[in-house]
Amino acid sequence: MDTALWHPFSDMAVVREDEFVLERGEDVWVYDAAGNRYLDATASLWYANAGHGRAEIADAAAE
């Protein structure tokens, strides 16, 4: 399985065999393929500090 995104501080040698794969995000929540929900407490500091799937942000960008 290829991984498209790694956290900048990941020790790739350690996580390669036990990847934590997220399927989707909504607001402050992220979900794995089994549907388990997790609070995205710190990871989004690097790429989504406004939350995931915010319609008002997508609408503003589309405008």
Image (spheres, grey):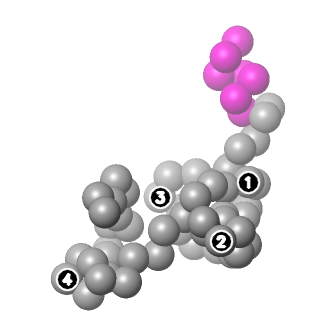
Relative to 43, does residue 58 appear above or below in the rendering? Answer: above
Residue sitting at the far left: 13
Considering only order in the chain, which callout, 1 or 2, is on the residue closer to the N terminus?
1
**Among the 4 quarters of the image, the one containing residue 10:** bottom left
Which residue is depicted at the point 37% across and 84% down?
Answer: 18
Residue that carries the numbered disc 1 in the rendered image: 26
| Pair 4/3: label in front | 4
Q: Mark 2 sits on what residue?
A: 34
4 and 62: which is toward the camera: 4
Residue 59 included in the magenta stretch of the image? yes
Query: Which residue is label 4 attached to?
Result: 13
Q: Residues within 10 Å of mark 3 (few under 14, many from 20)?
A: few
Q: Spatial distance from mark 2 to mark 1, Cα to Cα?
A: 15 Å
Which residue occupies the extreme top position in the image? Answer: 63
Q: Nearer the viewer, mark 2 or mark 3?
A: 2
* 2 vs 1, front mark: 2
In 3D space, how far apart are the residues under numbered discs 2 and 3 (Cα atoms)? 25 Å
Magenta residue check for 14: no
Q: Main secondary structure of the magenta part?
A: helix
